[in-house]
């Protein structure tokens, strides 16, 4: 990945252009320019991971930052305050849409360029990695005339891509589709998209109230972040509209709980909810170099417990010149919960979470994220390690899933009584291979219990959040938009808002 530029001879304009083009060609999502006491360190994020890309010498450091600020429309005389900008341009024949933010740090200005790339969603719903069974469920879900469908996952799990792909299918002349988004990430012809502007009072909730007077058939809400939006969304969906939205929870069960916490009336949610799609992104094995290896006893046991299958060989990452450490691109693993009458009644009648869990995963036979992920390991799409990285042993399973939990923790069910003992075993499972990353995360993870429990696997997610944090524009926005500040992650999402840029 590392690239050496001829800093002495190339004009700074060309260096910046080449860095941006090259990063975009490498499918990077972000470019980071980190000032140090001497050089300017450049890193790019590819498939969710930050990798070193270049080192800009001291004499080119400032001109390079200034150049980026000029092309993104920032004030170059201001370097003490954070700024936001955008680059919408054709550079070397490539149509680019970039969001740029600066943050004054002790060694100068840190710049992060986010490269907006929507190529994934234009490929359609069937390219998102849904298993045939889940794909059928999703297709059926979006055919209903009213109800609410929620797509859940943390930041950077491809929620927007899934929502846009669903909208593309619904986008026919006989439907009036209106969205309210922050930001509008992809412009779709035939769909009426509203960009919120909280500074002038155009919030999700106020926009929604107006949208309801615009005779909509389908409403898409970029994200449900506050109680009021949640309530309007649910009410809209029981009055003859199909509502699509995303919410920051990690699985179907938690989504139901979260909505109830948001003051959505139980009986309304029971009748409104049509489905929940939970998703996470894992790195895709490079098809050029992946190789087959024998599964370890631990892996065999996990396959046996989770899927009831005897697996002897699985694919493993190798690495070639076309990929990064054996991985290339990412693929989603999903859990698709279609709401049937039994689950509807259960929500309305306030049954215990454990009972609801049994209905969802037992009778309803919803394929869990772990099951879907392991199937994708068998198919050679991703690796066992990747699935383990994104599965949250505490949060994804109930108390009755003792055998699965133990399998994941590397224990045999009969060795342990009913009590699950995580702490010591966790360390056996975790494959800590990146000391630097770990060190960084130790600090970052502190305010966030949820992520602490995700073992080292959470590391990347946390870095993602950190990354997002770096692109925060005005901190005021964070404070004012989210009154549900109990969920820190949610408010982190807000910095995606590039209101001023559009
Ligand atoms: Zn490869």
Image (cartoon, rainbow, N blue to C red):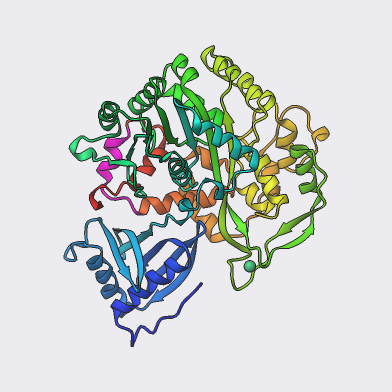
Residue 234: percent from left, percent from top: 40, 23
Residue at figure coordinates x 38%, y 43% from the top left: 492
Q: Is residue 250 left or right of residue 194?
A: right
Residue at figure coordinates x 64%, y 42% from the top left: 132
* Residue 171, placed above or below residue 294: above
Residue 195: percent from left, percent from top: 28, 42
> Residue 355 lies in what quarter of the image?
top right
Report the residue that reaches farthest toward the front: 174
* Residue 324, placed above or below residue 262: below
Is residue 21 shown to the viewer in this render? yes
* Residue 297, placed above or below residue 489: below
Residue at figure coordinates x 45%, y 26% from the top left: 145
Residue 392: percent from left, percent from top: 60, 40
Residue 39: percent from left, percent from top: 37, 74
Q: Nearer the viewer, residue 425 or 403?
A: 403
Ligand 1 image-quadrant field? bottom right
Decide whether residue 134 is among the magenta residues.
no
Magenta stretch, residue numbers: 471-482
Is residue 251 shown to the viewer in this render? no
Report the residue that reaches farthest toward the left: 77
Q: Is residue 460 left or right of residue 61?
A: right
Q: Nearer the viewer, residue 44 or 313?
A: 313
Decide whether residue 478 is among the magenta residues.
yes
Report the residue that reaches farthest toward the bottom: 9
């Amino acid at each position: 990945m590392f690239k050496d530029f001829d800093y002495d001879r190339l004009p700074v304009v060309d260096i910046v252009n080449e860095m941006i083009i090259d990063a975009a060609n490498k499918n990077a999502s972000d470019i980071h320019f980190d000032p140090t006491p001497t050089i300017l360190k450049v890193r790019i994020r590819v498939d969710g991971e930050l990798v070193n890309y270049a080192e800009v010498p001291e004499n080119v450091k400032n001109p390079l930052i200034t150049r980026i600020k000029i092309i993104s429309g920032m004030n170059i005389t201001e370097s003490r305050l954070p700024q936001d900008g955008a680059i919408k341009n054709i550079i070397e024949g490539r149509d680019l849409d970039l969001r740029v933010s600066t943050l004054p740090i002790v060694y100068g200005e840190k710049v992060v360029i986010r490269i907006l790339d929507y190529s994934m969603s234009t490929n359609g719903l069937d390219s998102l990695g849904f298993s045939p069974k889940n794909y059928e469920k999703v297709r059926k879900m979006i055919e209903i005339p009213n109800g609410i469908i929620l797509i859940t996952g943390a930041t950077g799990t491809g929620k927007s891509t899934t929502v846009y792909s669903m909208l593309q299918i619904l986008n026919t002349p006989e439907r009036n589709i209106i969205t309210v988004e922050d930001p509008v990430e992809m412009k779709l012809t035939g769909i009426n998209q509203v960009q919120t502007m909280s500074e002038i009072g155009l919030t999700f909730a106020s926009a929604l109230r107006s949208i309801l007077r615009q005779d909509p058939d389908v409403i898409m809400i970029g994200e449900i972040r506050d109680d009021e939006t949640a309530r309007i969304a649910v009410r809209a969906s029981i009055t003859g509209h199909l509502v699509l939205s995303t919410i920051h929870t990690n699985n179907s069960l938690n989504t139901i709980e979260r909505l109830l916490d948001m003051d959505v009336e139980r009986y309304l949610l029971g009748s409104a909810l049509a489905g929940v799609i939970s998703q996470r992104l894992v790195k895709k094995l490079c098809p050029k170099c992946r190789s087959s290896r024998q599964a370890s006893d631990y892996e065999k046991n996990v396959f046996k417990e989770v899927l009831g299958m005897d697996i002897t060989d699985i694919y493993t990452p190798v690495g070639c010149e076309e990929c990064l450490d054996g991985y290339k691109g990412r693929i989603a693993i999903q859990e698709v919960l279609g709401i049937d009458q039994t689950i509807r009644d259960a929500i309305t009648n306030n049954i215990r979470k454990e009972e609801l869990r049994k209905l969802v995963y037992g009778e309803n036979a919803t394929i869990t994220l772990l099951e879907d992920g392991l199937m994708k390991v068998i198919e050679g799409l991703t690796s066992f390690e990747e699935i383990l990285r994104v599965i949250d042993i505490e949060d994804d399973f109930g108390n009755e899933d003792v055998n699965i939990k133990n399998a994941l923790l590397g224990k045999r069910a009969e060795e342990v009584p009913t009590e699950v003992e995580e702490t010591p075993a966790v360390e056996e499972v975790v494959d800590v291979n990146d000391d630097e990353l770990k060190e960084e995360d130790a600090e970052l993870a502190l305010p966030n219990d949820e992520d602490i429990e995700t073992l080292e696997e959470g590391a990347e997610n946390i870095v993602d959040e950190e990354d997002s944090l770096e692109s925060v524009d005005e901190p005021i926005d964070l404070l004012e938009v989210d009154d549900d500040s109990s969920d820190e992650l949610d408010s982190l999402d807000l910095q995606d808002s590039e209101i001023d840029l559009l």
